[in-house]
Amino acid sequence: MHESFRRVELDALADLYGIKLDILDYKQYPPQSPHCIIRLPDEGAARLLIHRCILSKGIYELWGSGPTYPELHEDIVRRTSAIWHKYKFSSFKFEIQSYQAKRSLAEQNNLIQSFRYTGFEGPIRLKDPEQTFCIFEEWECGAQEPTRVFLGRFIAPSSRTILDTYTLKKRKYLSTTSMDSELALITANLAHAAPGKLFYDPFVGTGSFPIACAHFGAISLGSDIDGRAVRGKEGLNIVTNFQQYDLLDKYLDGFIADLTHTPLRAARLLDGIICDPPYGVREGLKVLGSRDGGKKEIVWLDDGEAAHLQDKYIPPKKPYSFAAMLDDILAFAAMFLVEGGRLALWMPTANDDEEEVEMELGIPIHPCLDVPSNQSSKKEAEENGKTADELNSFRKR
């Protein structure tokens, strides 16, 4: 799980649906907790917020919390005794989730029995009960007792189960730079992909971002400077990926172009731009053109056909700095995004162990774009010895 993006995903979805969200307790770094306590207007808002979350497993109504079980029970009585009658005859079950620990079946049963004072008289059903109550425990490594305990009533699950559907292990058309499916879906959430919106990826590759946006109902299109990526190989391409997920009706098209030579009409057309620009030695950052400005004349082949009309034609390219590309991406977004539209942009951060990133890059700015959120995976990446990337989102003023 990409833990460093969990809070910003919640904030982005609350913004998308106009939900007032207050985060009361969230620990991202050690001593970290897998639980995030939030305040929402009502249960309907909770269901709406969680239903497309990728980094949360589910949402529960908090019935009580405390550092020990006696204090937990006291808190439950204080908070919820007035509503126990609503669930008195409902079918129900109890679950226990222990973070950094494991309980025996006997221990679990004893803990569940300690909640008999709630007076539930409905049938116990382990499958599809009307109500599910979960005991959450947080343990420190090697501790004899949990450090915090909670009781929650289950409200709704998240969309995390879709990760198995979209995993790259099962995708038909891939390349070495295909974006991880989980990160693509998170990025689509930050960019507010939704039905009735048009999204564009100017570095489309094998289509990971357009597929993620299409999953959430947006119409998507993409382009790439490398025509081979758009055309595909051996009968596989971006279209077959959309067909694999039954999302072809959400794919507008793909075309060959780079950001500095776009054929799109200059107008506010796009609700979102979502991209992972190429950088470093492996990707080879370039734009169309030549170093000396030449090679613009048409080359005719022996059969009389122009070379640039061949399917296998690779146009000349020239080097392109990453800083210049960031400026071009922001300028493109300022021109093409509708008011309130979003740009979600991946970019590298400095990492002393990598030669590919030569300097530390700050958050790029543009006078027509606000920065509603910024979240970096740098710490997580350094611990795993990987190149550190940062995800920034911008909103058109």
Image (cartoon, rainbow, N blue to C red):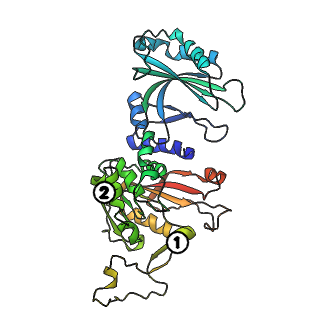
Q: Nearer the viewer, residue 392 or 116?
A: 116
Q: Which mark is residue 251?
A: 2
Q: Position of residue 271 (x, y in %)?
A: 35, 55
Q: Which mark is residue 49?
A: none
Residue 62 position (above or below residue 340): above
What whole-number distance in Å separates the C-alpha atoms at marks 2 and 1?
A: 27 Å
Q: On the rendered structure, is 73 left or right of 51?
A: right
Q: Quadrant of residue 395?
A: bottom left
Name the secondary structure under disc 2: strand
Q: Position of residue 269 (x, y in %)?
A: 31, 60
- Amino acid carrying label 2: it is Tyr
The residue drawn where x is 46% and y is 12% is 82
Instruction: Please say if the residues under marks 2 and 1 sit with CB atoms less than 8 Å apart.
Output: no
Q: Which mark is residue 284?
A: 1
Choose the circle earlier in sequence order: 2 or 1: 2
Q: Position of residue 121 (x, y in %)?
A: 44, 8
Q: Nearer the viewer, residue 342 or 137?
A: 137
- Amino acid carrying label 1: it is Gly
